[in-house]
Amino acid sequence: MKIKLLLVGLISFFLLFSCENDDEENNIHDLPNGFPLKVGSAWKYQKTYFENGEIDTTYLDTLYISGTHESYYLYSWNPEIYKSLVKNVDNKLISYGHIGSSVTFYDEPLIFFFYGKVGCLNSTDFENYDYDNNTESFCISIQNDMEYLGDNWDTYVEKITYLDNSDDEYTYYNSLGTVKIENFNEYNIITYRCVLLEKLENVYPPQLSIKKTETKGIYYR
């Protein structure tokens, strides 16, 4: 009888241990309510341009949160030249201006990302903010349990189409920040991809600028 009880106890222990491990391995990060703004954070990406669906140019680039100005975070791909003044407000990442050769504040701030909002938006959702009148549709959906950097993340997917047949833009963002951007032309052939390779902490931009590859008109957020 004691042996049977011991066997039952051991089986229960191993089942419990196995379930706990499964939970850890399948840990899913929930959707955020804002962009992870922290001075010293940086995101390393691989950016690739395509011609007729084939790789044309590829290179590495880094997005930095390099410091603060008043109550704003300095958000930039090239901080030595240009820094956006951003903050999270009302479940949005908003750019209120930028620092170049001087500090400039916008009459109508730019919404970089929406959080907690799903569905197709229109100009009324951008009231008091800058809105591109060339926008045909601006829709946000959610993809659950997407794998990035070896873990699983619920992720917002923003799709923008344009009236002038510019490339459709898909932006994926979650608690890590922006994890992927892809553009497709009118024939649904990929023209651009930006993929997160690594998120870094306590990293600051180099003192000397390095000339980057021509951006070919891509607008970076």
Image: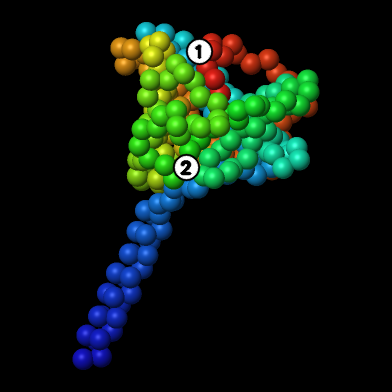
Does 213 appear above or below 3?
Answer: above
Give the distance between the C-alpha atoms of the residues marked 1 and 2, in whole angstroms: 32 Å
On-image quarter of the C terminus? top right
> Of discs 1 and 2, which sits in the foreground?
2
The spot of residue 149 in percent (x, y) is: 47, 41
Labels 1 and 2: the sequence-earlier one: 1
The answer to whether residue 105 is above or below residue 6 is above
Instruction: State the scheme by which the image is colored.
Output: rainbow
Residues at marks 1 and 2 touching, judged by CB atoms closer than 8 Å? no
| Residue 197 seen in the current view | no
Q: Circle 2 is placed at which residue position? A: 115
Q: Which residue is mark 1?
A: 57
> How far from the left and from the top, in percent, is residue 2?
25, 90
The percent coordinates of residue 38 (x first, y second) are 65, 44
The amino acid sitting under disc 1 is Thr
CA neighbours of label 2 inside 10 A, class few (<14), some (14 to 19), many (20+): some
Name the image quarter holding residue 125.
top left
Amino acid carrying label 2: it is Tyr
- Label drawn at residue 49: none
| Of residues 170 and 107, the one drawn nearer to the viewer in this rendering | 107
Identity of the residue drawn at 45% across and 22% down: 193
SS state under label 1: strand
